[in-house]
Image: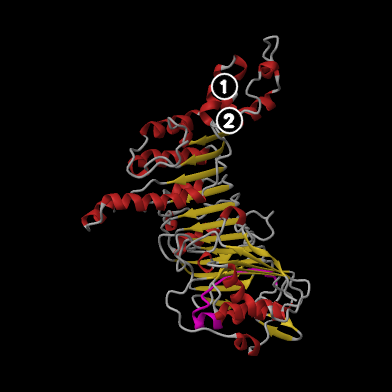
């Protein structure tokens, strides 16, 4: 593939830069290893522990010593055998954590390897030795350093060994090129897996996978910049009956995502294009995210269809005008069946307020979610404005029920356009229980505080429906934001009630403004 692109006249140095950026996103989505070779000791000078020279640690029970060894990087765990005869058999009897970057001369301190650097053959050989010599099980294995195309034989043997020795967590990344190297079907033999992340591969040909192959214990699946077909993705989801967290980022091909799962709780789709997202039957699904990076807001699905998802609480970022939203399930309201998703309480949208057709789609989207508590709206910059809407558009339309019960409203990258002000004024005048409205002002609009006040005067002088509401203005820290701020770590962390409220804005334009 690289040779073909070079024949087409693409500068190899430019390819390296682009591919390094490409790999940066892959590594950013990978979970951190549970051990670190650079962890600081809590007590650097521990001589007080053995004032009489007696080795008291070796006197601890086997179960305690095994626990200690299992928390060490593989190289350090093996070295414990040199401490005393008491320790020699321990490292072979504990679940091992193997991170190949820890085997590099700098222990991976400088970060992921870059394209253009030599394949670390010594690391590849060390991985093969450790996998062969340790009887297992393997608690966690990160394999991200080897150029797999150069080591296809080792790659296949690794998967065979990991399947036989009960690997629990596997992070497996191919260092391109080629970026579409086919994964062996042996992967589906790793039935012990609870977490699996695959980066820069072509998914196995599922037509060749045995019918009984499955991931019965898999709870977290990450697919990063892979080549996959609709059937391959559907197969992996179907064979993962316990899956709770699904992350797809940077798919190399457009595919359709069809969610039929009684276990999934959170789905993240980042910097990827899925032709369709069809939530068919996902009774436990609580969070569904689409995010973009690198200022590429078009990399997302063209249609989202929501069927049976009675626990879906958090949804975003939707794009009225660029996406179709279809609700296929019906709910009885006052004896009438309507197509709504009553469970959604937190919604995030990106809106081009300078594009009239996009703004006109917003009310229809909002009406699908009558029980919203919190609304996040990112105002996208319009390259080619095609018209604006005024307050009359909002006032004369069919009532939007969710606005009445809304408690929090966040508006990002406010530029002071008439359409933006009209939308905010409509919320202020209709939201009866609104407690807080946060407006993050785009940096380009902060030439003076008086200018911001003038643009917001129609809002501050409006007759607010909620007397308890506070309006807060913050300065955006970004000069040219390409996409909404998003954290995939926070998104999948259920301890964060609102994963869109990242509070990345700190500088107040002014204190809370009285609006009555």
Residue 78 in view in this figure: yes
Determine whether the residue tagged by mark 2 lies in a helix, strand or loop: loop
299 displayed left or right of 288? left
Q: Are marks 2 and 1 in contact (CB under 8 Å)?
A: yes
65 displayed left or right of 118? right
Disc 2: CA contacts within 10 A as few (<14), some (14-19) or many (>=20): many
Q: CA distance from mark 2 to mark 1?
A: 10 Å
Is residue 52 rendered magenta in the image? no
Q: Earlier in the sequence, mark 2 or mark 1?
A: 2
- In depth, the one of 120 and 466 nearer the eye is 466
Res 72 label:
2
Task: Point out the stretch of residues depicted in magenta.
Answer: 343-360
Instruction: Determine the residue located farthest toward the right in the rendered image.
Output: 468
Identify the residue position indicated by label 1 in the image.
80
Res 397 label:
none
Q: Is residue 71 above or below residue 508?
A: above
């Amino acid at each position: 593939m690289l040779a073909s692109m070079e024949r087409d006249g693409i500068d190899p140095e430019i390819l390296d830069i682009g591919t390094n950026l490409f790999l940066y996103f892959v590594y950013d989505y990978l979970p951190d290893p549970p051990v670190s070779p650079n962890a600081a000791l809590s007590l650097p000078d521990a001589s007080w522990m053995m004032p009489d020279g007696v080795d008291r640690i070796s006197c601890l029970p086997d179960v305690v010593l095994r626990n200690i060894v299992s928390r060490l990087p593989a190289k350090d765990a093996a070295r414990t055998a040199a401490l005393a005869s008491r320790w020699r058999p321990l490292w072979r009897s504990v679940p091992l954590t193997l991170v190949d970057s820890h085997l590099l001369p700098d222990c991976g301190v400088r970060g992921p390897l870059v394209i253009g650097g030599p394949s670390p053959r010594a690391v590849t050989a060390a991985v093969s030795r450790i996998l062969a010599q340790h009887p297992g099980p393997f608690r966690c294995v990160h394999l991200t350093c080897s150029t797999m195309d150069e080591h296809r034989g080792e790659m296949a043997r690794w998967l065979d060994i990991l399947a036989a020795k009960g690997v629990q967590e596997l992070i497996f990344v191919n260092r391109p090129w080629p970026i579409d190297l086919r994964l062996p079907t042996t992967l589906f033999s790793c039935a012990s897996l609870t977490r699996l992340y695959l980066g820069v591969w072509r998914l196995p040909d599922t037509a060749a996978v045995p019918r009984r192959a499955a991931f019965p214990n898999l709870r977290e699946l990450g697919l990063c910049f892979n080549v996959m077909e609709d059937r391959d993705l559907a197969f992996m989801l179907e064979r993962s009956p316990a899956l709770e967290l699904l992350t797809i980022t940077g798919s190399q091909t457009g595919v359709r995502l069809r969610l039929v799962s009684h276990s999934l709780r959170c789905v993240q789709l980042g910097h990827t294009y899925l032709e369709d997202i069809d939530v068919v039957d996902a009774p436990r699904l609580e969070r569904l995210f689409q995010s973009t990076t690198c200022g590429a807001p078009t990399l997302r699905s063209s249609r989202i269809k929501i069927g049976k998802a009675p626990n879906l609480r958090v949804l975003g970022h939707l794009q009225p005008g660029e996406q179709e939203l279809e609700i296929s399930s019906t709910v009885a309201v006052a004896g009438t069946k309507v197509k709504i998703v009553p469970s959604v309480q937190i919604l995030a949208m990106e809106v081009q307020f300078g594009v009239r057709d996009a703004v006109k789609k917003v009310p229809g989207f909002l009406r699908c979610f009558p029980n919203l508590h919190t609304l996040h709206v990112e105002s996208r910059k319009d390259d080619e404005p095609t018209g604006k809407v005024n307050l009359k558009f909002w006032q004369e339309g069919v009532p939007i029920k969710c606005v009445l019960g809304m408690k929090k409203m966040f508006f990002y990258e406010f530029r002071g356009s008439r359409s933006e002000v009209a939308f905010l004024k409509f919320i202020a005048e209709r939201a009866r229980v609104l407690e807080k409205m946060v407006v993050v002002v785009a940096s380009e609009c902060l030439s003076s505080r008086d200018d911001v006040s003038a643009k917001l005067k129609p809002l501050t002088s409006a007759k607010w429906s909620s007397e308890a509401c506070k309006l807060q203005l913050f300065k955006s820290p970004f000069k040219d934001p390409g996409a909404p701020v998003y954290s995939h770590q926070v998104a999948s962390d259920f301890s964060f009630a609102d994963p869109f409220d990242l509070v990345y804005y700190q500088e107040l334009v002014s204190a809370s403004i009285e609006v009555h």
